[in-house]
Every structure is written in structure tokens, then in C-alpha cells.
Image (cartoon, grey):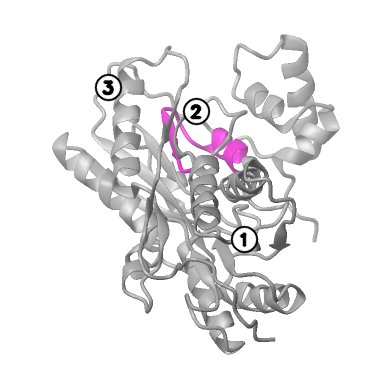
Amino acid sequence: MSSRPKLQDVANLAGVSIGTASQALNNKASVSPETRDLVFRAANQLGYELPARTIVPADKDTSAIGVLVQAKVGQSVLIDPFYSAVLNGAEQECKRHNLNLSYSSLPVNEQSLAVEWPHLIKEQQPTGWLVVGAFAPETVFELEQRLTPPVVLVDTHAPDSSYDMVVTDYVTGAHDAVAYLVDQGHRHIGLIGSSPESHPGIQQRREGYARALADSGIETLYIEDSPLRSDAVFHATQRLLKRAPEITAIFACNDDVAMSVMRAAYDLGRRIPDDLSVVGFGDTGPASEIIPPLTTVFVDKVLMGALGVRQLLDRRQNPARVPFTIALGTRLVERQSVQKAVRQKVKT
């Protein structure tokens, strides 16, 4: 049985980018009538589903907000300490404004592509949406077809989207983490938990890693690609340490990755931080509770959720204003998983 056509299929048939296809199907003024007609004809030819759009009157009060939160297939969003904190911030801000909030998980695969659409989209018409999670651009464009504006993206970098966004400056945060390791005397620093196909937020951490080393005059990069799954990270870490036993520190793309890195290092007989220093990213709850407590990059997840709601309310009041993005800074939290680099006998 053939699979249902996707927005990318429509864009390919029309000979335009996926962003242009999305804007055309949303009747954006930035798309010429000729291009819009081309995209619609491609959609009709492929049988691409054009969801019905409900127009919300501009003078209607915002009394209900729908939240779609990224989750792995079969996983509750409340299990994810990062996004549950973002959701907490959104709930607190909704209470301040006497708003109702309903949420649903939006399951994704390893490429951060949506694998199914929750009933919340089909059955309810809230007067605003928060989309929380690091989604692939194609998923964002699909959401543009399914959600009634206004919509605010939280933790999704989608430069071709017309939505408002609340994001984190992942490049600078990763740069600061790796620069800190360099300041501790480390010159052989690995990167775990990324790949060229990762979603933009992970790719930006990869960019920050490389930029920090370049700024320090360090030419050798130690990168072992892997998805974010704990088992994949465990094996990637062991491959990297066996391939390059001179490594004395690893920057992990998030805290869960860092904990899997530590387990893999222990399995090889390396102690943390005596034989290997580790830095994570996110500062989720478990980071301060593991042994040794994890040095990591703090992301203000609660503030991200609150700012998402504020942007949504502002967009309701000013529907014609230009889209804008809020980029939150980060800070390094020093704990006990890093020590200064010393000459040591590497265990192989």
C-alpha cells in the first residue's frame, strides 16, 4: 500500500522549496499567484490532504491554548525532564492570565519527523498553539497546514517558517562548554550525540563544539556520530574511546547523552573525572543527582515555556506584526564531572 503523500512530495513536484510550498498552501502574500497555483495543482495531482482551516475571529478572547509536545514513540511527555519543565513554565504563565491549557504528545522518529498526528489537532480548535520540541523542518511545515494561527514554536529552529519562536542560543552554549574544557587544559575533546542528519538544535551544538576548538587553535576533531538513544550513545562512546584513547574529555549534546557516555567510560575502566571529563547540556534534574554530579550547560526551560505563552498572547493582539524570535542565553554549571587535564596513563 502506497504511503500518503507528504509536503516534501508536493514541493518536489512543483519544483519549489518545502518552505515555499508551505507558504503557498497557507495563502501567504509572499508567494506569487503563479507559484501558488503551481503548488496547489501539484497537491491535487498527488492527492495531498489539505486540512480544513477554521478562522478564529480577531476579537475573540484567547481562553484556551493547545500545546503539542515532542515525544518519542510510546513515551509520555512527562517522562522527558526537559520538555516537562517547559510545559511547567507554560502552565504557570497560563494561570497568571486565567487561560485553559490542553496538551498532547506529538510522536517523532529519530529524525524528529512526526509519525502520527494527535486527536487534539482534529477534535479541538484552541485559539492559539504552542509547539514544543526540536522538530524537523518538514514537520513544522506540515503543522502549518494543520494548525489554525496563531502558533508559537518553542525550542524549534525553523528559519523558513513564518511563526514566532522561542529558542536557545545552542551555538554559544556549546562553544562555552568546550572552551571551558580547553581552559581546564584539555586538548583532545570528543563530541557524542550528534550527526549531520540531526535536528537543527543538535547541529548547532555540533557547530559550537567545532568553533570553540578552532578558536583555541585546536585542529583535531573527535566526533562519533550517533542518534540520541542511550544504547546508540553507549556504543558510539566506546567506539570513539577505542579509536582515540588520547581523548581526555567529551562534550555530550544533552544530559541523557552525557550519562550514557559516563556508563560507557566506566565499562572501559575509565573513571569520571580522573580519566575522562564529561560536560552535558540542558541541566535537567538528574544532572545534579548522578555520581559524580554532572557539569552541564543550563537552559532556562521554565522561562522558555512562559515566553511562548507571552508571545502567543502578543500575537493575538497584534496579528499583523512581523514574526520575531527570542533567543535565550545559557550558562555553564560547574559540578564534579570535570577536572584539569593531567598526564595520565590511558586505559585501552
Query: Residue visible at 70% across and 39% down?
Result: 7
Counting from the top left corner in percent of width and height, residue 9 is at 78, 40
- State the residue in front, 205 or 21: 205
Please tell me whether residue 194 is drawn above or below residue 230 in the rendered image.
above
Neighbours of disc 1 within 10 Å: few (<14), some (14-19), many (20+): few
Query: Residue visible at 63% across and 48% down?
Result: 203
Q: Name the residue under label 1.
A: 109
Label 1: which secondary element: loop
141 in the magenta segment: yes
Q: Can residue 47 be seen in this view?
A: no
Please tell me whether residue 133 is drawn above or below residue 37 in the rendered image.
below
The magenta segment is 139-155
Please tell me whether residue 103 is drawn above or below residue 8 in the rendered image.
below
Q: Name the residue under label 2.
A: 163
Looking at the rendering, in which quadrant would you find the C terminus? bottom right
Q: Name the residue under label 3.
A: 60
